[in-house]
Amino acid sequence: MFPSVAVVVLNYRRPQETAACVKALVQSSPAPASIVVVDNDSRDGSAAWLRNALPQVEMVESGKNLGYAGGMNTGLRRVLATEAAYVLVLNSDTLVDPGTIASLVRELERDPSAGAATGTFYYHPETTRVWYAGGDLVWWRANAVTRRSPPAGSPGGTGEAHRVSFLSGCAILFRTASLRTTGLFDERYFMYQEDVALCARFIAGGYRLLYVPHAVLYHKMTDDAQTPLKVYFTMRNRLLLLEAAPNLWGRSVGTAYFMAMFCLKVVRWSLSDTALAGAAARGVLDYLGRRFHEGRGLM
């Protein structure tokens, strides 16, 4: 009997995109046992629209914008109150191939020491260009590095699953038992780096993280340009992430690298984009002042 799988999808003002994501999910073989859609306080009629368009899902309204971490946790708590063996967290701008969930489950079933897994992400609609093909947590850079080299055989290649140290929060299949042990996303991050931090906790807890090349997903990336919101959270949260470094060397070198990178970027942005420079400064100041969660990122 195939293990039960639940899915949590976070919506924020993109109801049509969320509906497309869910419609791809229900075509999975086998289909998920349950799908929870969390509306992260969109305030644009998204929740009502999705209830009408997707009567088969459980709609949850957060009541407040909780960011990625808090929004996903809202859905995860619903799932952890059930008997689901696995739970997939999925960005609304992602489409899964019909066999993807089954492939991820099979690899986790083969390796009881693995707590979570993800597959290969291709850009959408550029479905042959790789967005994620495994990743590495690099403490000296206070960040994770994503690989973009195509795996063996593309899309739906036959490369073997292997261990990595970073899974993109865009789509992660968790063993629910491991989540109960390790805990959910750290809501202080709000958005950005919360997936890196959770991967670090999984590894510290003795769990393996798996990259499954032949499990295929498509990510509707539109614009990866820097914005003040992204810069604010990234700067603040990379410093917060360093607190989880496993040793003094990682924290010390990571902090030195971060400060050098921060100074160079602020100087450059001061000459080209003062909004980005200001956001970077606020991020560091809010870290030092222990101002987490949404901080000043949404102001």
Image (cartoon, helix red, strand yellow):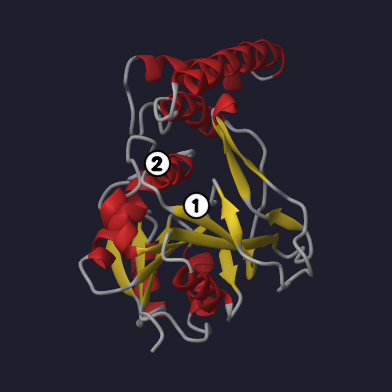
Task: Say which quarter of the image contains residue 258.
Answer: top right
| Residue at image mark 2 | 204
Q: Does 251 appear above or below 191?
A: above
Between 113 and 105, the residue placed more toward the observer is 113
Task: Name the residue at 33% across, 45% down.
Answer: 66
User: Mark 2 or 1, which is nearer the eye?
Assistant: 2
Q: Is residue 25 left or right of residue 85?
A: right
Q: Is residue 122 left or right of residue 238?
A: right
Between 289 and 115, the residue placed more toward the observer is 115
Image coords of residue 222 (percent x, y): 67, 52
Q: Is residue 186 left or right of residue 141?
A: left
Image coords of residue 192 (percent x, y): 48, 39
| Residue at image mark 1 | 169
Q: Amino acid at mark 1?
A: Gly
Image coords of residue 171 (percent x, y): 51, 60
Task: Say which quarter of the image contains residue 78.
Answer: bottom left
Residue 40 shows in this picture: no
Q: Callout 1 environment at 10 Å: few (<14), some (14 to 19), or many (20+)?
A: many
Identify the image quadrant of the C terminus: top left
Between 92 and 79, the residue placed more toward the observer is 79
